[in-house]
Image (cartoon, grey):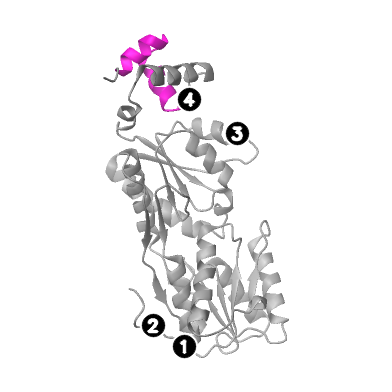
């Protein structure tokens, strides 16, 4: 039979509140006391799942510092808004948070005293291991890791549909401009691009796969990659960018060079951020608010110790003027 939290606290010689904070890895407890309580809980048979079944009151939404820039914030701001709405309905306080790479990740997170943690977007594997070791309910949005619940847009299918639409429009040399392939979503978008080429019987040309090096500012990296593509003996007649922020930079840079969009070169993005429609940018629409809400639902399931699962959210092709009037979606593609 499991002992009560009060019995555990008495055995450790601490208050019930201190015992609870120690087991939840919250602040206000010395490391020595924390380890003592955890060891006694194991030795005396305290059921720690009983503590985890308490309602979540405070959720930390962890966003990588590279997602907090002007170029990426429209996408993640919408995800955070969706998560905020879902938390409000549950009476949960949501705290968006960006860690400082120069300090202790564990200390920074524990100072926020969260009951559970959501991670949105890219996260370094070593940082994720630190977070997992905290023992708190954890779920992922727009990224993936083995054994953890997560929600993602259907990145591969979206990029496949966009590339296939350009192929049907008669584009012969379609390039893919990629960010760091350490990002789960970017890897799958590149895979979707290659999948469409393969299905059309085309060989992927390595020269048409441009990469913005990690750590390089988006505008500068995009300009450099575009210059390399346009310097090819046979330059591309279409570019699929890994996201809309990159595609919008491409649009402006091509026009500054005197290229006509879409007559000389078609440009497409991914995400459908607010600036995409006014620019006439063809893109793949992601329901970002729904993604944030689904992340909260996955976190609540994790807090109830339900089996971890990864779900894909459908995306929608939006073809606008940047890819031309002959670019049409696949009527047989998934809705």
Q: Which residue is mark 3?
A: 104
- Magenta-colored stretch includes residue 253: no
Residue drawn at the location 36% of the way across and 44% of the way down = 299
Asked if the residues shown at circle 1 and circle 2 are in contact, with their CB atoms under 8 angstroms apart, the answer is: yes
> Does residue 27 lie above or below 255 as drawn?
above
Residue 263: percent from left, percent from top: 56, 90
Depth check, mark 1 against mark 3: the one in front is 1
Residue drawn at the location 54% of the way across and 69% of the way down = 190
Q: Which residue is mark 1?
A: 168
Label 2 SS: loop
Which mark, residue 27? 4
> Does residue 82 lie above or below 317 as drawn?
above
Asked if the residues shown at circle 4 and circle 3 are in contact, with their CB atoms under 8 angstroms apart, the answer is: no
Badge 2, how many Cα within 10 Å: few under 14, some, many 20+? few
- Magenta-colored stretch includes residue 8: yes
Q: Which residue is mark 2?
A: 330
* Stretch in magenta: 4-26
- CA gap between label 1 and label 2 equals 9 Å
- CA gap between label 1 and label 3 equals 51 Å
């Amino acid at each position: 039979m499991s002992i009560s939290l009060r019995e555990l606290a008495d055995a450790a010689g601490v208050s019930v509140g201190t015992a609870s904070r120690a087991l939840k890895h919250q602040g206000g407890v010395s490391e020595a006391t924390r380890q003592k309580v955890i060891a006694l809980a194991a030795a005396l048979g305290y059921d720690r799942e009983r503590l985890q079944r308490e309602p979540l009151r405070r959720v930390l939404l962890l966003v990588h510092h590279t997602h907090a820039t002007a170029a990426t914030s429209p996408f993640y701001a919408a995800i955070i808004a969706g998560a905020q709405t879902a938390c409000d309905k549950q009476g949960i306080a949501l705290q968006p948070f960006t860690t400082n790479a120069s300090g202790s990740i564990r200390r920074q997170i524990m100072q926020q005293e969260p009951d559970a943690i959501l991670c949105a977007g890219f996260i370094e594997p070593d940082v994720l291991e630190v977070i997992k070791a905290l023992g708190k309910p954890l779920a992922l949005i727009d990224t993936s890791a083995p054994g953890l619940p997560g929600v993602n847009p259907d990145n591969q299918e979206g990029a496949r549909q966009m590339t296939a639409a350009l192929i049907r429009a008669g584009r012969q040399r379609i390039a893919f401009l990629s960010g760091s392939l350490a990002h789960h979503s970017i890897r799958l978008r590149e895979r979707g691009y290659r999948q469409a080429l393969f299905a059309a019987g085309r060989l992927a040309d390595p020269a048409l796969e441009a990469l913005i090096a990690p750590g390089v500012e988006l505008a500068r990296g995009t300009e450099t990659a575009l210059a390399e593509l346009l310097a090819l003996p046979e330059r591309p007649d279409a570019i699929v960018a890994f996201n809309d922020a990159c595609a919008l930079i491409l649009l402006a840079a091509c026009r500054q060079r005197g290229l006509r969009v879409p007559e000389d070169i078609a440009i497409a993005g991914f995400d459908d951020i607010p600036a995409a429609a006014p620019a006439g940018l063809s893109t793949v629409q992601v329901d970002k608010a729904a993604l944030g809400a689904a992340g909260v639902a996955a976190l609540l399931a994790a807090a109830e110790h339900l089996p971890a699962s990864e779900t894909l959210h459908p995306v929608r092709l939006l073809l606008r003027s940047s890819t031309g009037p002959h670019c049409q979606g696949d009527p047989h593609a998934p809705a």
